[in-house]
Amino acid sequence: MALPPHRPTGPDTAALATLPTPLEPMPRLGVALGLGPDDLWVKRDDLIGLGGGGNKVRKLERTMAAALHDGADVVVTSGAPQSNHARLTAAAGARLGVPVVLVLVGDEPATETGNLLLDRLLGARIVWAGDVGAEGLAAAVQDAADHERSAGRRPGVIPFGGSNAVGARAYEDAGRELIDQAPDLRDVVVAVGSGGTMAGLVSALGPERVLGVDTGAVGDAVDRVRSLWGAIAPDDAAAGTLRIRSDLVGAGYEVLTDDTRAAMQLVARTEGIVLDPVYTGRAAAGLVAGVRDGAVTAGSRTVLLHSGGLPGLFGHPHASPWREA
Ligand SMILES: *Cc1c(COP(=O)(O)O)cnc(C)c1O
């Protein structure tokens, strides 16, 4: 039975998100950090609507539309085993009626938790790439796409993290949405993974208003963000200085650091907002560190981007660290 499309899809955008996402005050966290009660806000892109929510939905509105416009009848993307982007691509495929193949780093685990559980629930097919680096993963994606082609299908490949110029432009729009909600915005604090989210925000808001927090997902976060920014605004990117702090990577992308753990706990216990251990918890730790070292100040409006990621908390190797806390 042919099911109807969920909502109309144009050449540039597939409607997947519920927009605008809320902007909420965090007065208790603000005061706990030594800021004023009106200084700190949170942009709830975790409440964006599709598949458990998160920043990847905005990018997928563009990247999925582009793939479909190019004639794709199956979509292939890649990521870490607990990739939020992979989960949300699976959700976007389900909503748009397109099969999704996820090429994930590593080997099939004995139990599938967190995002991986949701990938299966959403009906994605998973290909395990083994213990590969970025190049090996790209080669595995090509293999998966070739496999689809040899079966007579037309695969569309969506890049790692949904971060290309098309995806980053979605966060340019998000930056404009944010400025409409908070015209007096001084800083927005954002986790940096594949870089498209920060690049788009920087393009819309200017580099001085965006404080990136490197998660260790890519080798050189500054270089990555600059090149994506350059792909959408070459003149600005050539001249501007990016603010990215890299002191919260700790022992690596998937390792829960003490700073992140403390920040997650503080946000949970002052505002009832749950962050994730890889991205938004690190962004909050960067916010706390920024207040400490003067990068974030009282008397001006700071926004933390809640970019989603909650399912990752339930698939994290250092799960249940709060039993004693
Ligand atoms: C992917 C991701 C980010 C980082 O976004 P990029 O555009 O990849 O830099 C931040 N938060 C969450 C929850 C994510 O899944």
Image: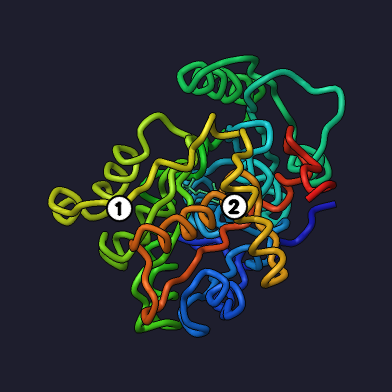
User: On the rendered structure, is 234 left or right of 64?
Assistant: left
Q: Residue at image x 51%, y 42%?
A: 161
- Residue drawn at x 56%, y 53% as measured from the top left: 56
- Give x and y (percent) for residue 131: 61, 15
Residue toward you, 300 or 129:
300
Q: Secondary structure at mark 2?
A: helix
Secondary structure at badge 1 equals strand
- Per the rendering, the mark at residue 281 is 2
Q: Is mark 2 within 8 Å of ligand 1?
A: no
Residue 302 in sight in this render = yes
The quarter of the displayed image where residue 149 is located: top right
- In this rendered view, identify the residue nearer to me: 65 or 233: 233
Q: Where residue 217 sits in the image (x, y, percent)?
A: 49, 35
Label 1 environment density (alpha carbons within 10 Å; few <14, some 14–19, many ≥20): some
Question: Does the image show residue 123?
Answer: no
Image coords of residue 159 (percent x, y): 48, 37
Give the quadrant of residue 50.
bottom right
Give the residue type that dot 1 points to: Arg
Tell me the amino acid under the disc marked 2: Gly
Q: Which residue is mark 1?
A: 243
Image coordinates for residue 184, horizontal then vertical, percent: 35, 83
Q: How is the image coloured?
A: rainbow
Around disc 2, counting alpha carbons within 10 Å, would you say few (fewer than 14), some (14 to 19), or many (20 or more)? many
Residue in the image at 67% along x and 20% along y = 106
Mark on residue 177? none
Tell me: 251 left or right of 173: right
Instruction: Identify whether 156 is placed above or below 176.
Output: above
Q: Nearer the viewer, residue 125 or 317?
A: 317
The image quadrant that residue 25 belongs to is bottom right
Closer to the chain start, of discs 2 and 1, is 1
Between marks 2 and 1, how big is the CA–CA gap?
18 Å
Q: What residue do we see at 54% from left, 57% from top?
A: 284
